[in-house]
Image (tube, helix red, strand yellow):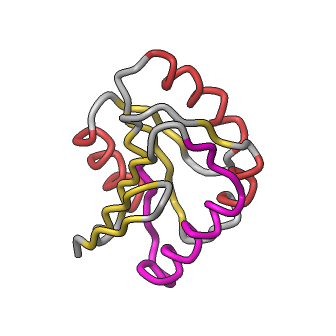
Amino acid sequence: MTDKLTFDFCEMHIYDNYMVVTMNDGVTIGVEHNKTLINVADTYYKNKPFVYITHRINSYSVDPAVYRETSKINNLVGFCVVSKNYLAKSTAQIEKLFLNKPFEIFDTLKEAIEWSKSVLK
């Protein structure tokens, strides 16, 4: 499955066991945006484990409260950030503290996808 979903704050690519999300530049992701993620997860991954991959090409911020809500998605088995940007990686290290799921940071999408396969086993 490779559906592409476009929202006013991001673009999502849906695959069989993971989604790759690219947020728009300058947005602040809040709980309302997270409801969209939950709806997409319920639609595409109902009762099926999946990994969320955020491809941080653009600069944006995330309200830490989002991670508390994201942690409640039972079938979300992993979360990862893909970026070569030092600041984005540093921010992700802090975000990691708020999510109660396996959380990794990678330089490339290929590494993130490989990791997602290991988490899904």
**What residue is rendered at 41% in x and 34% in y?**
58
Task: Report the side of 117 relative to 36 (left or right).
Answer: left
Where residue 40 appears, x then y in whole percent? 49, 74
Which quadrant of the figure contains the C terminus?
bottom left
Residue toward you, 59 or 39: 59
**What residue is rendered at 50% in x and 53% in y?**
78
> Number of numbered discs present?
0
Residue toward you, 113 or 9: 9
**What residue is rendered at 56% in x and 31% in y?**
92
Where residue 100 appears, x then y in whole percent? 68, 50
Which quadrant of the figure contains the N terminus?
bottom left
From this view, report whether residue 84 is shown above or below residue 101: above
**What residue is rendered at 22% in x and 70% in y?**
2
* Residue 34 belongs to the span the image colors magenta: yes
Where residue 99 appears, x then y in whole percent? 67, 46
Where residue 22 appears, x then y in whole percent? 39, 48
Residue toward you, 4 or 8: 8
From this view, report whether residue 99 is shown above or below residue 41: above
Q: Which residue lies furthest to the top in this view?
A: 86
* Residue 49 belongs to the span the image colors magenta: yes
Range covered by the magenta-colored residues: 27-53
